[in-house]
Image (cartoon, rainbow, N blue to C red):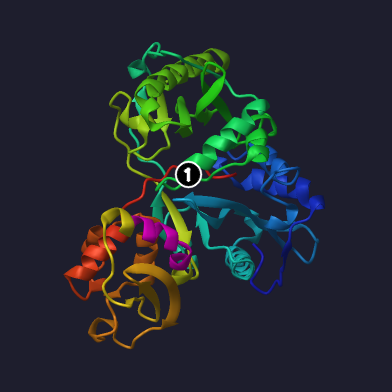
Amino acid sequence: MTTGTVRYLIRPGRPSDAAELADLQASVQLQRVTGGKPHPGIAAWVHDLLDGHPSVTPDDFLVAEDPATGRPVASLVSLRQDWALTGVRLPVAQIELVGTAPEHRGNRLTEQLFAALHQRHAADGVAIQMIEGIPYFYRRLGYDYALANDGAPTLPAAELPPRGDAGDFSMRPATAADAYALADLDRLLAADDVWTCPRDVAVWQYEIAGRRAADFVRRAVAVLVSGTDVVAYLVYGNRLSTAGDVFVVAAGALRPEDWPVAAPVMHAYLGQAGREFEAAEGRPFTAVRFLLDPRHPLVLHGPHGVPQRPRGWYVRAADPIGLLTRLQPALRARWQAAGLRWPEPELTIDTYGRAARLEFEDGTLKAVHAVPGEVSPPTSPSVHAAIPPAALLQLLLGHRDLPGLLDHWPDCLLRDRRTEEFLTAAFPTVPVHLWTRT
């Protein structure tokens, strides 16, 4: 193991790094699956990210270079994307492929890479960084568990219907020509009070036909059609998992009223796909594993399955008040839907260091400003709510509603019942229908 006296060069990735980064990541990721051998799916994914990916350029990689050899010995990649909530688009960076060669561990290279990454994202105005990975580890780097990315029940293969009540609907594999209809559908879904990651035409074409066959995150895309019109989509794994599951990562429909009929058709299609994988791979197909919110319509309109505990995404927002500012349209829409108007010119949320001053005109939110916080927010007459930054992040993302936050955080304090009613309407729990760009 090298010592901490080595001064590594932290630099952006380059196209010429492709082979070495693919070898590095393939040798350190998912080794428990490969028995210590390089993972070919990880290598293919790295090559795809560095070769025509619509959301990534080589510069989105950060590399720790060994000065003695000039070779990459640790790296990560930031996958830029927009998430949507009630039509609000937020710039988000999903961090993936964080890895260090074994002989260079112990030199705090992950911390150095993340420090450079956070500095870059602050300069670029990225609102949120998100990562899924080692339990607790990323809390040390400023991340908090603030989103759940599945939790829907798993359906045993025997519980899947042999066929759905199709009506006018039928399912087929998507083609690149479907990308225009799928992008239109995503634009409509982005207006809902649900977290989504909408894809444009180029991204849909890439997902359908642009990845290498071995790419670890390659998915199968199917469309539900009525006549010749694409009215829904289903995205699932293109092979069985090690446990024999078919993973479902996304599903969306043009019309909410179609789900009672669309869902059984999708369930039957997944059963057919699982049986085809079983025949091709020579392994038993055991279940469909929905990596979806338990409230997703595809889940609600299906058979009861085996409950699963949600997994967590760790999230960092360097400026929660800035995130609150970006979400103003969502807050206005929720207060309007609840028939609530704030009776004062201002409402102040203090985060024990900085504060958000919400300005109102005729009861309607007009602006949010960051201002210095109070020395003792709970005792200040100008403060309506005192909410720690990590708690505010969970509130803003809809991971917890206000009653849940008050139960979980003793230092989350409100001035009066009117403030509680107003903020409860502003911050409900939000379903997470995110199929992130990887």
Residue 395, quarter of the rendered image: bottom left
User: Can residue 34 be seen here?
Assistant: no
Q: Residue shown at 36%/73% (left/top)?
A: 360
User: Can residue 376 be seen here?
Assistant: yes
- SS of the residue at dot 1? loop
Residue 156, quarter of the rendered image: top left
Give left or right: position of 122 versus 354: right
Give left or right: position of 104 versus 395: right
CA neighbours of label 1 inside 10 A, class few (<14), some (14 to 19), many (20+): many
Q: Amino acid at mark 1?
A: Leu
Viewport quadrant of the N terminus: bottom right
Give left or right: position of 422 versus 240: left
Q: Position of residue 184 (x, y in %)?
A: 57, 36
Depth order, front residue of 382/290:
382
Residue bounds of the magenta highlight: 323-334
Among all residues in the image, which is located at the extreme front?
Answer: 362
Q: Against 147, is 343 above or below?
A: below
231 is within the stretch colored magenta: no
